[in-house]
Amino acid sequence: ETGVTQSPTHLIKTRGQQVTLRCSSQSGHNTVSWYQQALGQGPQFIFQYYREEENGRGNFPPRFSGLQFPNYSSELNVNALELDDSALYLCASSSGTGYNEQFFGPGTRLTVL
Amino acid sequence: QQPVQSPQAVILREGEDAVINCSSSKALYSVHWYRQKHGEAPVFLMILLKGGEQKGHDKISASFNEKKQQSSLYLTASQLSYSGTYFCGTEKDTGTASKLTFGTGTRLQVTL
């Protein structure tokens, strides 16, 4: 059974640029949630995808967008990067949208200069 | 609204016990507990559901007081490997699960 994987591991961008982060869900999981974790803080929910549809969104602006593919892998896109976007971006996969455990990937560390 | 965890930090000697609390102002359906070591992803420990169902590790226990919207994580006979930051994540009772709202975190350090 393959766990949740994310790419890239680290990324450095400049303000105003765009970035795409990728996540492969754990085998058998059809739901992917994305979180932003600033240094010293708990993860903050960005949005969730279930069977290729957005299924809930946190308090993030529209420049944060996502996709889920037929194989349940997912992308997080951030446009017009700001300095405050610097954070660890985590994706978590789970089975269904019920109250189930979520398994996290190792994260992508994004630095915006 | 973000759940509040207490204590913020705790230092234990190996073999000692600890309790970490998580409190929310919203009606909850579930509470999830995770441990995160520095530079690593959060690792699932336990989920407690309204109505009493629990899923998680055998060696870690937790409670969920639905009326008070509070949960506690009990770490007994602590080991060095228990060190890390513990987060509770809560889900509101909306009928459908949509997101986890994570708490402020409790930093636990176990020493020899």
Image (cartoon, rainbow, N blue to C red):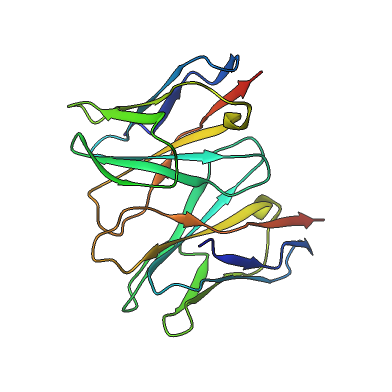
Reply above or below: A99 against A103. below
How many numbered callouts? 0
In the figure, is residue A58 to the left or right of B5? left
Residue drawn at (47%, 16%), measured in percent from left and top? A18
Q: Is residue B69 visible?
A: yes
Which quadrant of the view contains residue A66? top left
In the image, residue A17 lies at what x, y percent? 51, 14
Residue at (50, 72) in percent of width and height: B62
Taking the view exactly as shown, the residue that stands out farthest to the bottom is B67
User: In percent of the image, x 51 and y 39: which residue is there?
Assistant: A36
In percent of width and height, residue B109 lies at 75, 55
Instruction: Tell me: residue A48, above or below residue B88.
Output: above
Instruction: Depth check: give the residue in front, B91 or A99.
Output: B91
Q: In the rendered view, tell whether residue A26 sits above or below residue B84.
A: above
Horizontal arrangement in the rendering, residue B12 relative to residue A20 (left or right): right
Rendered view: B42 above or below B70: above
What residue do we see at 31% from left, 56% from top? Answer: A100
Give the quarter of the image for residue A83: top right
Q: At which x and y percent is residue B63?
A: 48, 76
The quadrant in which residue A38 appears is top right
Observer-nearest of B45 and A84: A84
